[in-house]
Amino acid sequence: MKKIFTKKTILALLIGVVLISFSFQSKFFEVAKQIEIYTTLFKELNMYYVNEINPAEVTTTALKNTLKTLDPYTNYYNEQDVEAAKIRREGEYGGIGASVRYSKKDITITQISKGFSADKANLKAGDVIVKINNQLLESLNREDISGLLLGVPGSSVSLEIIRQGKRIQKNLKREKIEINPVPFYKMIDKEVGYIVLTRFNEKASSEVKKAFEKLKAAGAQKLILDLRNNPGGLLGESVKISNFFLPKGKAIVTTRAKVKKWSNTYTSRNAPIDLEIPIAVLINGSSASASEIVTGALQDYDRAVIIGERSFGKGLVQRYRPLSYGTQLKVTISKYYTPSGRCIQELDYANRDPKTGIVPKFSDGGINEFRTQNGRKVYDGGGIIPDVNTQDILIGETAKKLLGSTALFNYATKYYYQNKTIAQPGKYSFSEAEFKSFKNYLKLDTTFVTLQEASFKKAFSIVENEEKRSVNKSYSKIMNSLKERKISRIIKNKKKLKERLKELILERYYYENGVYQNKITSDETILKAVAILKNNKKYQELLAPKE
């Protein structure tokens, strides 16, 4: 049919084009205007500010603070940040084989990897590094310290550490460190195989496949995949791992973006390695992103029973975009959706309250119901809800503050130097007597301080010296009372605290491997998964639709 354009139609089209063009130019002008304002401000600051400024540091701070108003995953990366991000993705770097915690004046070793330089040099968790290559760390930021510690494999690095009050000099050679995303896998018994996946780096799918094939060769008829505390990583690796247990051609995850080419449905492209083996996937509140993609896909296709706690709820996808001079922007480009259509993003950053900074939850406006392949009900609104909930709820802000402090870590260090040996990993438990010792330790600890203690201490500090002598006795009595009250509050969380202390202590004697050796004999969620997998009727009931 021939189209006839009237004068009115042509005029409307022209007006539309003009408006679009004006809108684009207006937006472009606003962007250019703001860039020019920052450039002129920076020049004036650099020229006239009374003290010397570090241009790179000022710009990095400005950019990072700008992005803070968006979401916590959209970040600016300077050259050092880019290298660190590359290490996380590729799982390889030149270092000493130790995890560390940074402070303003030093770094504390928190974990030693077995067999690497730090282990060979007899470094221990709890050692405090105060100098690297004779460089004091007090004046350096985190990126500078990291740059000193990492380096080319084969190069030397000297450390000055403080251990239990003594200064010790250590000379080490950096090695090529490969981060294995599957630090542990083993047959729990004659039937059940167990795999731990801690991150989704470039080695994730190959290492999971390798572990699974070895377990199958050892007789595994059922599988536990432990994704607890796995923060995620590469989307492609999550698709590959899901594909191991799902037929070729199945939708694994869908992304929806502002840019059309980044809106995709990722499907399983390869032949699966096992479509029959019963699977239990373990998750908790720190299982996020790629962990939730795997969990959501296996749940939506009724391919696994999900056991544990509600997952974190990160349904946002990021991509790295190159910027000038080797810097990068990691930007949130899309949301992802499970095969049933669920977006499990919990926090709605687009509607952050400008006054309070509080970010609302999508579930505040209600949740939506979806159906799995078998017809089971599942829901959106924040995280993956497990089929079997084993959540041990943390009671009270005091317990949360304790777990967020370094008190448990410091106690584990003290315990290690007071006890030459402990029971074998599979038999060790943190006893009632040891928990009593831990409570006594908290009375002396300075890192676990409640708001009441801090406020009272601050009030006492401003009392005049002559008055302090008269109130000193009362002050000590009240402080002791506050400490006793603080300790009485954490007793409600004794089970969780004992479990965490046990893990920290086992790491000191038997490395990370010892923690997992203990878990497969005593972890309640793992034992629950074993029981469900070995009860086929229960397993099938959990995957059947419920009305």
Image: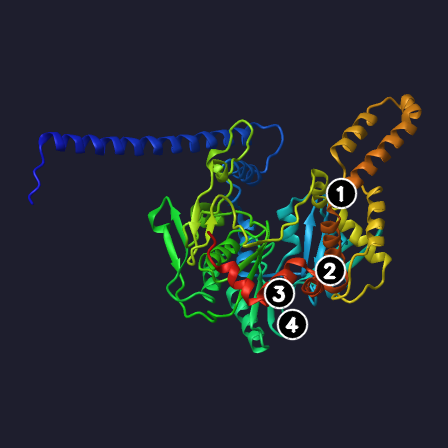
- C-beta proximity under 8 Å, tags 4 and 3: yes
Q: Which mark is residue 490?
A: 1
Estimate how packed mark 1 is, as few (under 14), some (14 to 19) or many (20 or more) residues with alpha carbons within 10 Å: many
Q: Secondary structure at mark 4?
A: loop
**Of the image marks 4 and 3, the number of the one nearer the N terminus:** 4
**Of the image marks 2 and 1, the number of the one nearer the N terminus:** 1
Q: Nearer the viewer, mark 1 or mark 3?
A: 3
Give the residue type at disc 4: Asp
**Of the image marks 4 and 2, the number of the one nearer the N terminus:** 4
Q: Which mark is residue 189?
A: 4
Q: Is residue 334 left or right of residue 495?
A: left
Estimate how packed mark 4 is, as few (under 14), some (14 to 19) or many (20 or more) residues with alpha carbons within 10 Å: few
Q: CA distance from mark 2 to mark 1?
A: 23 Å
Give the residue type at disc 1: Ile
Q: Which mark is residue 507?
A: 2
Residue 163 shows up from this direction: no
Q: Looking at the rendering, in which quadrant would you find the N terminus?
A: top left
Residue 186 shows up from this direction: yes
Residue denoted by label 3? 530
